[in-house]
Amino acid sequence: MRLMPFNVWTRWIKRRVPTSLWGRSLLIIVLPVLIMQAAVTWAFFDAHWQAVTARLSEGLAGDVAWAAESYRDDPSARNLALISERAERSMQLSIAFQPEASLPVEERRGALGLVDRTLEKALASRLDQPFWFDTTRYPAYVDIRVQEADGVLRVIAPRERAVAT
């Protein structure tokens, strides 16, 4: 790719810059305001997105902790069916138990990692047992697994329950 010579660039810029005093003074005042407005908007929405994602992750972690504690209180198949039905109806969580299973060894993390760090922090604060989660395999869901004494409790949650979109 060949770049244009320097004088072509200067000529191109001079043609597009206002020539009158009114136009130049307007450009001097308006351009910095627009740049500052864009920066402030970006900073606000980024902080807002992080705060909402943290709250959503904490709520999801609380629901997963409820399911794990409810299962630990009564690890029968009947109780698991009741927990699963309640979680599906009121929390949009799909819960299944995998007997004699253990947590996966591999870690699956997203490219940016903000969602993963936020969800990991929320789950670590709510769960006493080891856990594993995956936010990348299923685009619309988050896969969370909690190690129990006799297997793994697997929770599939909609992604919008953990991340502000």
Image (spheres, rainbow, N blue to C red):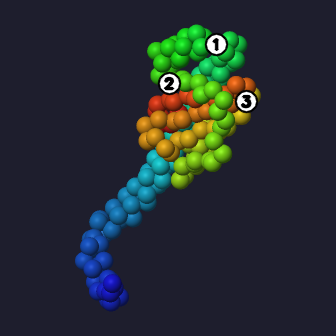
| Placement of the C terminus among the 4 image quadrants | top left
Confirm or deny contact between disc 1 and disc 3 (CB under 8 A).
no
Q: Position of residue 114 (x, y in %)?
A: 58, 46
Q: Amino acid at mark 2?
A: Ser
Q: Relative to 92, is 26 above or below?
A: below
Task: Give the foreground label among 1 and 3.
Answer: 1
> Label 2: which residue?
94
Judging by the rendered image, the residue that carries numbered circle 1 is 76
Question: With 151 as the anchor, is 46 left or right in this view?
Answer: left
Q: CA distance from mark 1 to mark 3?
A: 19 Å
User: As drawn, is 9 to the left or to the right of 100?
Assistant: left
The residue that appears at 62% across and 47% down in the rendered structure is 107
Q: Earlier in the sequence, mark 1 or mark 3?
A: 1
Three-letter code for the amino acid on which mark 1 is drawn: Ser
Residue occupied by mark 3: 129
Image height of 25 relative to 64, above or below = below
